[in-house]
Amino acid sequence: MVYWNETMPPLDTAQIRADIIPDDWSTLPIYQNGQLAAWTLPNGEDTIIGVAPYYGSLTSMPQMIIHDGIVQIFYSALTLGFATEDFNYRHIWGTFSESDGNWSDFFDYTDDIFHVISECVYPALAPQVHNGQYHLLYQTDQLPGNSLQPDPPTHSPVNNNIVYLPLDLTVGIENQYASASFEVSQNMPNPATGETMIMVNTEVLGPVNLTLSNVLGQVVYRTTENANHFGSHTFKLNVSNLEPGIYFYTVEIGEKAVTKKMLVK
């Protein structure tokens, strides 16, 4: 994936070679000029099994937001190590630049146990940061490719999900939000069946808001506790009436928010 803006040298398309995975990306001029934003990453001895047609590149469907001088890109990319017998799956990836010609390490946002057999495509990013988070939607099902193309298509029509994925701003770089003055534990147990607990350790006094949302971004539960002392506070959630699936819980104190993922069986 190539990134260019008007402050950069003219982009010579002859510099874009046909290599899918060169031995050393750093030798390419578009890398040295800060124009190579993303590429298909190697994964040990894994190879490309097959490419389900989307009529785009192996790293494609880009979404970009510029916030406080940070260029953040999300995209869908063919991912080695996740495949059927015929095709590799696509995952949602991200990277950022501080507009200095250098790009961060890549991060696979869908590499967890919930996405072992998931085709993740068509990311759509909200144009503004809200509560210190990026807000992303993507489409997913269990089969690489789609049911519309080519002819005949990769697979027959199947149900898919539109997933809402809130992402905290990248930490460890300048001009980003300061880290939250509280910590939120992973819910226990996870996966949850009847009741699950979330621990919040805070250095701030005041209301602590907890919101539970489904993958569509719909709020299914909301509660508020008052932190009248520093230290640990416990939320107990009864999830027995929730449909099995993936949920996101967000803890807000003041203007800071932390979001984590949980699974309900």
Image (spheres, grey):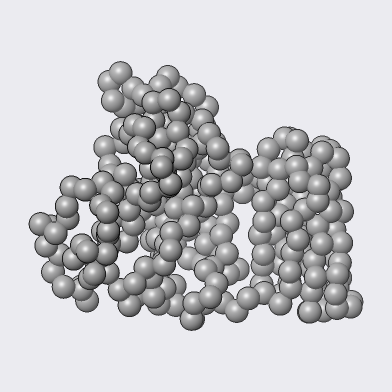
Residue 13 in sight here: yes
Q: In which quarter of the image is the C terminus?
A: top right
Residue at (73, 69) in percent of width and height: 183
Residue at (81, 51) in percent of width and height: 188
Q: In this view, does 110 lie to the left or right of 264?
A: left
Residue 23 appears at what percent x and percent y? 27, 54
Q: Which residue lies furthest to the right in this view?
A: 228
Q: Is residue 173 left or right of residue 220?
A: left
Residue 41 appears at what percent x and percent y? 38, 51
Q: In which quarter of the image is the N terminus?
A: bottom left
Nearer the observer, 34 or 140: 34
Q: Would you place residue 239 above or below residue 1 in this image?
A: above
Nearer the observer, 33 or 162: 33
Residue at (43, 47) in percent of width and height: 43
Residue 247 appears at what percent x and percent y? 68, 46
**The image quarter in which residue 242 lies:** top right
Count the marks: 0
Q: Which residue lies furthest to the front in this view?
A: 45
Nearer the observer, 46 or 5: 46
Residue 124 in sight here: no
Residue at (67, 74) in percent of width and height: 180
Residue 252 appears at what percent x and percent y? 71, 67
